[in-house]
Amino acid sequence: MIDWTVEVDFPGLALRAEGIVGAGEVLGIHGPSGSGKSTLLRILAGLEPGARGEIRVHGTPWMGRDGQTVPAYRRRCALVAQRPIFFDHLDVRDNLAFGRRRRGLPDDARLFDLLLDVLHLDDLLRTDVTRLSGGEMQRLAIARALYSAPDILLLDEPLTGLDDDRKQRIVDCLLRLRGELRTPTLFVSHHVQEHAWMSDRMVFVDRGRFSESFDVGAALRERGLNVLDGLLVDDDSVRLDVDERILRVRERPPGLVPGDRVRILLPAEQILLADHSVTGLADQALELTSSPTRLGDHLEASVGRLTLVLPAGSRGRTAHFNLHPHNLRRL
Amino acid sequence: MDFPGLTPLLVTAQLSAVTTLVLILIGTPLAWWLSFSRNRFRPAVEAVVAMPLVLPPTVLGFYLLLAMAPDTVLGRGWFALTGTTLAFSFSGLVVASAIYSLPFYVQPLTAAFSRLGRETLETAANLGASPTATFLRVVLPQCRQGFVVASILAFAHTVGEFGVVLMVGGNIPGVTRVASIAVYDHVEALQLTEAHVLSAILLVFSFIVLLIVYVYLGRRRAMLA
């Protein structure tokens, strides 16, 4: 667990942030470029000498009000930068193991193999680090970070510059590793979609001001996206966490098996509101239990304990929609 | 010694070796500071380091001679420390050569450190490498080329100096009489054979050193391409 109350002043940026991330949790940090997202990660990593405040990790202070700070190299926190840097006098294997060796930890064959397997690095072990592609560099950087057995994982736009297919693959890797390693993670991105894939809670940043954190479902409803977490119980149904309701899926998404935790991403525009249930119109017909109210550019209404964001300008009592494989993500 | 005429070469070799060693010890931290400091006086320090490139060696030698006089802070301090004077001694020559060759060592190394970049150091620190480990395991191997080139240039440039050593060293045979001055003396005394031998050795030496540098640089470039 990590918690922080920090501030730093640069010309044009006065950063004030506080927050907390627990084991196995991903805190998404969302905001425009230059708003201070990366700077917060650098402060936590001990790379901003001008920062003040408090940082505690598992109760141990990394930075205190008295000005005491733990130097960067003694903080077990791994930062995956947007453009990771490797040491080109070392091969891929030695780059991957660099952090773990510097921290004096013995090799861990099981973790090493897990990282190679999940991040598809087997073929790269004999490659020259100067010849890696963007996606390969990101995967190697993530492996290097996690192999150093960090207390905290800091991801700074790790998906930037990758095509959608590669993004998906890396997100899958990260989610699998999160399940295995449960490292508290801060995930910086300015793409809502990426937060919808990755984050449990979200913080919004604007010119150095960090908001309080929101549940990712509540945060993304404001942006017109329903985020529903649940369990894939069999080939074509998901049991939602919030009310144990079963939702039908058109077909099982490739790569998922019953028993997987899944996240449903359903844009408001994919929901049709009608006055009453129309048989055959859609797989799902959920009767609203509250009147729709305005939420930003959209409408919001309850279905029992479930809250849905609905397209603006529509009227009716029943929400109709279908779930396709592309609406589902492994969690 | 069997060939007394070659003694100046020996002095030159000793002087260059000791000067290069001194520069590695002093110039390396200086180059580091110039690469990574955000101090506002950095440009001034850079200018001072580059001064020997522009100043006539005699001017530099003149000021160094004044600074080494027994009644100055430097001269007195040196005398208190060693019981000898700095001017007209081998140690004085080393001090003068180190200052004169400083840019030839510091500038290539500063460039190498800057190419490495602050991000590389941050990456190493983030992965748990202490400053010492970072220097030994990342900076040294990554900047090996910079260190080699800087050291060779410093050595070779010290071999080639004339004006400063003439002013500061005083041309004492076997102590401060280096090869370049010996050549001058031989020519003045019309001992052209001796001048020929020393000159030819220096010529071949300089060519070989530069050849080594360029072959080394060329191979590194080919490896990177």
Image: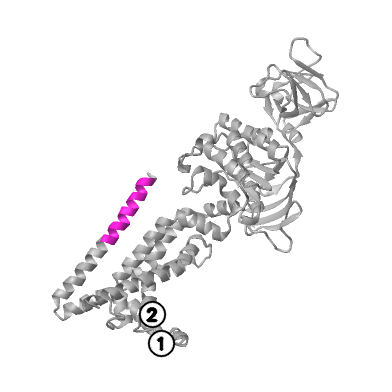
The location of residue B172, given as percent across then percent down, is 28, 83
**Residue kind at label 1, given as amino acid type:** Thr
Q: Is residue A98 left or right of residue A261?
A: left
Cα–Cα span, label 1 and label 2: 10 Å
Element marked by disc 2: helix
Occupied quadrant, residue B151: bottom left
- State the residue at coordinates (55%, 31%): A163
Q: Is residue B179 magenta?
A: no
Which numbered disc, 1 or 2, marks the residue that appears first in the sequence? 1
Name the residue carrying label 2: B91
* In the image, residue A113 above or below residue A232: below
Mark 1 neighbour class, 10 Å CA radius: few under 14, some 14 to 19, many 20 or more: some
In the image, B117 versus A281, the foreground residue is: B117
* In the image, residue B133 above or below residue A24: below
Q: Is residue A29 left or right of residue B192?
A: right
- State the residue at coordinates (70%, 36%): A179
Magenta-colored segment: predominant secondary structure: helix
The subunit letter for the residue under badge 1 reads B
Residue contact between numbered discs 1 and 2, judged by CB atoms under 8 Å: yes
Occupied quadrant, residue A313: top right
- Which stretch appears magenta? B208-223
Q: Quadrant of the C terminus of chain A?
A: top right
Name the residue carrying label 1: B84
